[in-house]
Image (cartoon, rainbow, N blue to C red):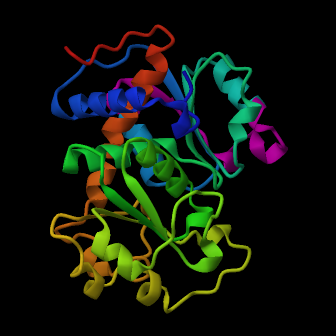
Amino acid sequence: MNLLSINDLSNEKIFRILDEAQVIQEQRHPPFLDLTAALLFYEPSTRTKMSFEMACKKSGVDLLTFTPETSSVTKGESLYDTVKTMEAIGADFVVIRHHKERYYEELMNLSIPVINAGDGTGEHPTQSLLDLLTIQQEFGSFEGLQVVICGDILHSRVARSNAYALERLGAKVLLVSKPEWQDHSLSFDYISMNEAVEIADVLMLLRVQKERHEEYKDDQHYLKHYGLTVEREKLMKPNAIIMHPAPINRGMEIDSSLVECKRSRIFKQMTNGVAVRQAIIHACLNKGGISYDLTH
């Protein structure tokens, strides 16, 4: 089983992964035996890469080290040939982050699972699943929740994966963005940040993707018009929570003093990322007949 898009998963499979992640957090479990993963990150990453490394370590999975700068990528080797090399030397699955959207369409002739850790501005299904676990732990259900995703929608793979999944699971999704960063291929309504803070049960902030803009100039007024200020936070519902996939541009998307405030779940998301990625590894490998019993 591959995990390439959040749309690869039925609602039933989403809930199964979330349930298994919860079990992993609550009890010890046996590791895999004699398995090896290749983490191929062609873009910088802290949380996703380290989270997968920790998930593998906790599951007893060995890692093949890889950095594009010191690999045959510098000699012109294609992604396909790199992944086929990993398969040939014994990797049981690969986790890939790549700057090209839908890079995985080049990798259909593989006998090992591919887990998408982010494809350009396409999707980020593992981030979506850890976000879903965080929301489920908080509210118990998605049905009827108002989730507002705020920020650089056009360049955000997190926004795309989360919007699709949350709508399917019963939440009402709304968006906030600068006009030039709106993505009208998504069928969700845009509202102002002032409206968002008053109606949101979940306020999901996004990083401004400076590296994906052809020309980017620092916007000193972004926080005032589109970010979460201290004044706006005071208008939020009593039980509303703040989320952000990170890394955070403090003082831009969110006032720095709010990053660890009482309603923030930003670091909880990171904690949940390890268990969710363990559950994803299990789901992808178990499809291939590898047994991983989480109940003992």
Q: Nearer the viewer, residue 281 or 200?
A: 200
Task: Give left or right: position of 36 versus 154.
Answer: left
Above/below status of 239 relative to 82:
below
Q: Position of residue 43 (x, y in %)?
A: 62, 53
Task: Give left or right: position of 236 versus 90.
Answer: left
Mark yes or no: residue 181 visible.
Answer: yes
Q: Position of residue 128 (x, y in %)?
A: 44, 46
Q: Is residue 74 magenta?
A: yes
Q: Position of residue 102 (x, y in %)?
A: 70, 42
Residue interval drawn in magenta: 56-80
Mark yes or no: residue 206 visible.
Answer: no
- Residue ID at (34%, 40%): 274
- Residue ID at (28%, 58%): 267
Q: Is residue 252 magenta?
A: no
Where residue 31 sits, quadrant-wise, is top left
Q: How many marks?
A: 0
Q: Position of residue 91 (x, y in %)?
A: 57, 22
Q: Nearer the viewer, residue 201 or 104?
A: 201
Task: Give left or right: position of 264 versus 57.
Answer: left
- Residue ID at (42%, 69%): 248
Image quarter hosting the N terminus: top right
Above/below status of 245 relative to 286:
below
Outermost residue on the right side: it is: 76
Above/below status of 177 relative to 22:
below
- Residue ID at (21%, 81%): 234
Image quarter hosting the C terminus: top left
